[in-house]
Image: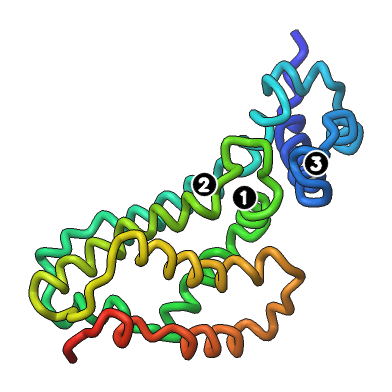
Amino acid sequence: MSRPDMSIDPRLLESAKQEFLQTGFLDASLKSICEHAGVTTGALYKRYKGKEELFCAVVAETVEKLEEIANSKTEVDVSALTDEALIAAWDMDEAYMMWWFDNLLEIKDGFVLLLKCAEGTCYSNFQHDWVEKMTEGSWNYYLEAYKRNLATKKVSRNEMHMILTGFWTTIYEPFIHAFDWNRLPEYNRMLCRLFDWHAMLGHER
């Protein structure tokens, strides 16, 4: 009995990743993917129903990593935090922001696919959906601080979402464009100077 070729799946996924990165999902060719992977279209269809399922397989590990990060940031019992911790959560600390960039760089290809190559897939609205997910956690921090009179400015949830959209756009952009990653520390410093959450929310410090 012949053994199945276990090298097909990694070859397909790598070929698909490169095709999606170069052309985007809508213009990607399954024929081209198969040719570069050295497999038949029949072999592809034995594994994936079509192009979207293949795209989802390529970004699956990235999505899982992002879910883990998001859950660690949003599933927090804010009522158990000290006043100091509630306010410090809004610090634009350079080391903390580099932590974000470092984690995203570890999944750079998948993150880029979700940001700029996913039109036509279930991840078409990824940028908005990610901000919405992160807004939920930030909103809970803000409400708790406001309830304790630690935040004095009235901010609506919609306003919070809009401001966070701007914030996350500054993180998305280096991945969307051909950024010189050697300049990341300086870019990070500029980003940290740009956002003053304490002033916006009226934190009593």
User: At label 3, which amino acid type do we have?
Assistant: Ser
Residue tagged 1: 114
Q: Residues within 10 Å of mark 2 (few under 14, many from 20)?
A: some
Using the numbered discs, state the Cα–Cα distance from disc 2 to disc 1 in whole angstroms. 9 Å
**Disc 1 residue type?**
Leu
Residue located beneath label 3 in the image: 15
Label 2 element class: helix
Q: Determine which quarter of the picture holds residue 41.
A: top right
Q: Quadrant of residue 112?
A: bottom right
Side of 82 where 16 appears, left or right:
right
Estimate how packed mark 3 is, as few (under 14), some (14 to 19) or many (20 or more) residues with alpha carbons within 10 Å.
Answer: many
Which residue is labeled 2 in the image?
Answer: 63
- Looking at the image, what colour scheme do you see? rainbow
How many marks can you see? 3
The nearer-to-camera label among 1 and 3 is 1
Q: 199 or 95, which is in the foreground?
A: 199
Identified at 55% across, 89% down, the residue is 190
**Marks 2 and 1 in Cβ contact (< 8 Å):** yes
**Apparent side of residue 48 relative to residue 12 in the rendered image (left or right):** left
